[in-house]
Image (cartoon, rainbow, N blue to C red):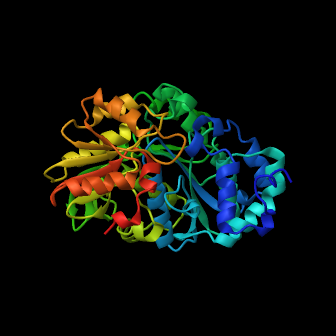
Amino acid sequence: MIFQNFFPFTFAEMNYQQTIDFLFTRLPMFSRIGTAAYKKDLRNISILCEALGNPHKKFKSIHVAGTNGKGSVSHMLAAILQTAGYKTGLHTSPHLHDFRERIKVNGAVADEKFVIDFVDKIQPVIEEISPSFFEISVAMALDYFALQQVDVAVIEVGLGGRLDSTNIILPEVSVITNIGMDHMQLLGNTKKKIAFEKAGIIKPGVPVVIGEYNEQTASVFTSIATEKNAPIFFADKNYSATDWRWEKQQLVVEVAKEHQQDRHLYHLDLQGIYQLKNLLTVLQTTDVLHKKEWRMEMPLIQKALSQVKKLTGLHGRWEVIHHSPMIVLEVAHNEDGIKQVIKQVELTSYTQLHIVLGMVKDKEIEDILSLLPSSAHYYFTQADIPRALDAVSLQEKAGLKGLQGDTYKDVNTAINEAKNKASEDDLILICGSTFLVAEVSRLSRE
């Protein structure tokens, strides 16, 4: 066995932690090492699924891509399907604390024993084809959903779309939230090129929902949808948020549908202002599903959206983890995402802003730093992964943009220092990297 020199166990003898250590250390992992882990074809996932009996063909699915918002949209759709009575799988990435967050059924993470047994079962194929971490995690999710006999699974794209391992599925509806400038080294350096990659999830005859209309990319989506005879819907052309407010730690949104007099109120337990766009995408998707005779009545949609975090375990989206001072976790990590977060900050009441910041090397770092306010106090740090930009380099780059602060060895040390310096009515924002947010200790929470 080729891995025995690294692990002194056979696969069947491993416990859960040893199995996870194997997955993290022996399989190429994009979140840790970047582009070297990216496999630009569907060959490996096809071989893995064939070995597993093609589990993706044993349940219905919904496919969600996009530069920003795809995680929130996936969780919102899963919450709605669960509330409608469907046994619902949910595959998202990356995870924050536990690998099994990537694979949930009705909000519950996969069993530890399943993870162990799966790796043991698939290890001959691992030896043969040397798949990436993400390819194995997708195959594992699909196998779990089949074994659990889910009615439907919401599958979030990992990166791009066309060549993403999740693109092996044939969904009920494809969803593309938006197009922004991220992962350009893999997807292209223009919005049109990135749109082409994400449009790769459009399947023949399968409806596709585009969350945000953009003149630069609309023609790409329309052309490919027409070529594949796929009905296409631009959510923000058919739905609009006519009013919104925060009320009792919820985002209350009034939504109107084009050519209809009725307006409906939605109470979201996801408080970020950027969820307005995601809500319209979700509503357009539920409309498509309703026309395909899925149970998508208005009362159940409203009920589900008021308890997305409770039903699905979504975290890290303008998540308030402490009061006096307010401490917020935010996984936004690219230019468009940070723009939305800054808009949220501007709508928030506070005396002084403290930003705990960490980033990875392959982002548009200077462009993102240019968006951040120079009036904030900064605490520069880094996640414990090879891709992370070290705190000193980040501090130097930020200094050139007029952003001042000290460096800290890890995010929790930085948070503790920010709490020591902050008054009760200040705001502490932790952002810049999903992996930074993932390392925030539960001790920092109330």
Q: Position of residue 47 (x, y in %)?
A: 79, 48
- Total number of numbered labels? 0
Who is closer to the viewer here, 386 or 184? 386
Residue 429 appears anywhere in the view = yes
Q: Position of residue 98 (x, y in %)?
A: 54, 63
Q: Where is residue 106 in the image (x, y as percent from the top left)?
A: 54, 71
Q: Where is residue 74 in the image (x, y as percent from the top left)?
A: 49, 56
Q: Which residue lies furthest to the left in this view?
A: 351
Q: Within the image, what quadrant is residue 377 found in?
A: top left
Q: Within the image, what quadrant is residue 34 found in?
A: top right
Q: Within the image, what quadrant is residue 36 found in?
A: top right
**Relative to 17, 305 lies left or right:** left
Who is closer to the viewer here, 304 or 332? 332
Residue that appears at 24% across and 48% down: 354
Residue that appears at 42% across and 40% down: 359
Who is closer to the viewer here, 96 or 68? 96
Q: Residue furthest right?
A: 1
Residue 146 appears anywhere in the view = no
Residue that appears at 45% across and 66% down: 313
Residue 321 vertical placement versus 436 (above, below): below
Residue that appears at 75% across and 45% down: 44
Q: Quadrant of the N terminus?
A: bottom right
Residue 377 vertical placement versus 48 (above, below): above
Q: Quadrant of the C terminus?
A: bottom left
